[in-house]
Image (cartoon, rainbow, N blue to C red):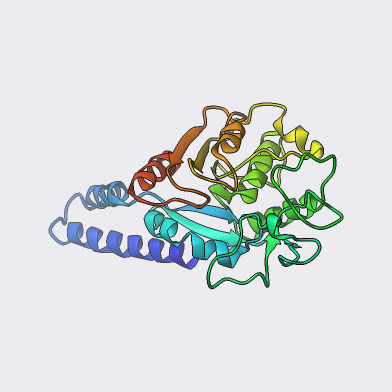
Amino acid sequence: MTQSNKEVMVSRGDALWHFVRGFRLPCRTGLAGGILLAIIAVLVMAPPPVLRLLCVHGYRQNEKTFRERTGSLRKALKKCAELLYVSSPLRVPPLGSPAQPPAAAGDGIQAGETEENARGWWFSNPDEDSFDAVDHVETCKGLEESLEMISKAMSELGPFDGIMGFSQGAALVSMICALKQQGDPRFQFDFAILVAGFRSRCKLHDCFYKEPVAVPSLHVFGDTDRVIPGKMSQELSSFFVDPVILTHLGGHFVPASAPQKQVYLEFLEKFQKK
């Protein structure tokens, strides 16, 4: 149980105690009925539970940089969702090295960030430990290790209500959703949020796209995204049953302004009521 959950339980318990005391003092008769009414009132007034989301970063990011880049989203969702982050086990060679020319920047770094701990979820070029979302390849490297890392995070940090991924992380989340639907017991969650996601072009990954995925999903992408064009994210959403689509006017980032916040909240609200 997390500290935040403990605090919620303690605060609800205190409220219940004071509420019950208020009923007991004036009512010496029908005490049991008064206490029952008090309990019902507290339960009715209690806020819905906070959802727990496992967050999966993009290529050339890690849990720290992704957490920093999603600060606005955490603030927007703080009353309904707790976001927890995980890093890939695969290190990405620094840009400028023979294996990582500038064109392989992927989700990139921003001012104040370093490449020191850049990570990726799989490599489309196994020989050079590099990745490009548009690479049509027969084989890849690192996916199984990454799936095991997500499984470990869910086991040790969970349970989780949902999973959210960005860019290559969103592509990985789509594969995890397919595995969940196929009965893989490692992945237990109720919904997925995929931001700037895409279908993997690796031939070995075709098995993840053979049948529609029924996991409830929200797909978010930008009209001016030059890293993962919107049509690639739209294509990924077509593999899901009744996907919720959220587009924005920006590029390759996780949006969290007022219009997007409302869509996030409406999507998450459905799972708070369960």
- Residue 204 sits in quarter: top right
**Can the viewer see residue 232?**
yes
Which one is in front, 121 or 186?
121
Up the image or down, 84 lies above or below 175; here it is below
* Residue depicted at 59% across the width and 30% down the height: 240
- Residue 36 point in image, percent of width and height: 28, 48
Which one is in front, 224 or 38?
224
Up the image or down, 45 lies above or below 87; here it is above
Left or right side of 142 for 19: left
**Can the viewer see residue 1?**
no
Left or right side of 250 for 97: right
* Residue depicted at 53% across the width and 63% down the height: 67
- Residue 30 point in image, percent of width and height: 20, 49
* Residue depicted at 61% across the width and 37% down the height: 232
- Residue 110 point in image, percent of width and height: 55, 65
- Residue 106 sits in quarter: bottom right
- In this rendering, the count of numbered labels is 0
Left or right side of 33 for 74: right
* Residue depicted at 69% across the width and 60% down the height: 102
- Residue 92 point in image, percent of width and height: 74, 63
Q: Which quadrant does the C terminus fall into?
A: top left
